[in-house]
Image: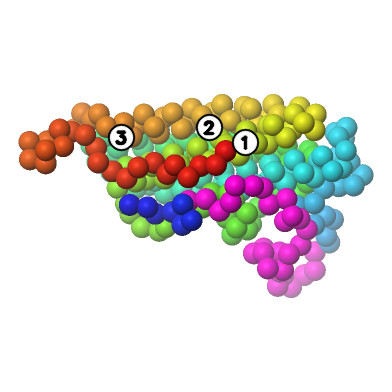
């Protein structure tokens, strides 16, 4: 069962042209009765710098990339939280509930780590939840309760995509000599690879729960769920 739209991913490149106010984007207009004092438009970089000795164009480009990672991590966080709430079954309700709790906690830490780097580059991070989903290179699964294997497969597809996009940013940051961004992204990437490994291992076809179905279905305990999405350009 495929629950993602567009194979689960919105695009394979960063939306570097999405900078400044855009009236078609959620959260970019306001009916607030009191006019607020605007200091900087969304997803723009300060021209005067921010205390980091990198050129304006470098700070803007990498700040926008990092902001998109944060949007994706926010989508992943919401999906992990849903799956954490809906764990069920002999192998899931206990151990998987705690594993997903770790994924949630660390993802929150990654959002904060990357958001801090975006701000240090002088760029305004995206915080509106609808705008985050619009900009994210991964999309939240459709609403509803599905099997735990489907939940985890969707999470694994997200992790693989996040890893690939982080590597693109690391490569670009090396080219632009932004080694601070390299270090932040490498720290996040290593942990996202751990999460991918966790999910992959949980989806292996071995199980402690047999019941009597293996005597009747002829599958010999071999899991027969949908394949991992292999549409993963890196």
Task: Identify the residue shown where x is 65% and y is 31%.
Answer: 185
Q: Pick whichever, 74 or 163, lies toward us.
A: 163
Marks 1 and 2 close (CB-CB < 8 Å): yes
Residue 134: percent from the left, percent from the top?
A: 60, 58
Helix, strand or loop at disc 2?
helix
Can residue 58 be seen? yes
Would residue 147 be found to the left or right of residue 50 on screen? left
Determine the CA span between mark 3 and mark 2: 22 Å
Magenta span contains residue 100: no
Give the residue number, with chain letter if any, for mark 3: 94
Q: Which residue is mark 1?
A: 166
Q: Is residue 151 left or right of residue 26?
A: left
Q: Quadrant of residue 31?
A: bottom right
Q: Residues within 10 Å of mark 1 (few under 14, many from 20)?
A: many
Q: Where residue 172 appears, x then y in whole percent?
A: 72, 35
- Above or below, 5 relative to 73: below
């Amino acid at each position: 069962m495929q629950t993602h739209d567009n194979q689960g991913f919105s695009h394979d490149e960063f939306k570097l042209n999405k900078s400044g106010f855009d009236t078609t984007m959620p959260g970019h207009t306001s009916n607030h009765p009191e006019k607020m004092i605007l200091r900087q438009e969304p997803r723009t970089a300060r021209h005067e710098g921010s205390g980091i000795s990198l050129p304006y164009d470098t700070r803007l480009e990498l700040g926008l990339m990092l902001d998109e990672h944060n949007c994706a991590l926010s989508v992943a966080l919401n999906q992990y939280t849903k799956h954490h709430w809906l764990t069920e079954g002999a192998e899931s309700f206990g151990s998987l509930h705690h594993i997903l709790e770790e994924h949630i906690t660390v993802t929150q830490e990654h959002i904060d780590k990357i958001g801090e780097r975006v701000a240090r580059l002088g760029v305004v991070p995206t915080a509106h939840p609808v705008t985050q989903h619009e900009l994210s290179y991964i999309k939240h699964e459709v609403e509803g309760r599905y099997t735990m294997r489907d939940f985890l497969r969707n999470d694994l597809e997200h992790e693989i995509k996040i890893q690939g996009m982080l590597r693109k940013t690391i490569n670009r940051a090396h080219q632009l000599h932004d080694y601070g961004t390299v270090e932040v992204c490498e720290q996040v990437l290593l942990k996202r690879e751990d999460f991918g490994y966790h999910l992959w291992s949980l989806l292996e076809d071995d199980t402690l729960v047999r019941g009597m179905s293996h005597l009747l279905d002829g599958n010999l305990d071999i899991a027969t769920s949908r394949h991992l999405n292999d549409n993963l350009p890196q």
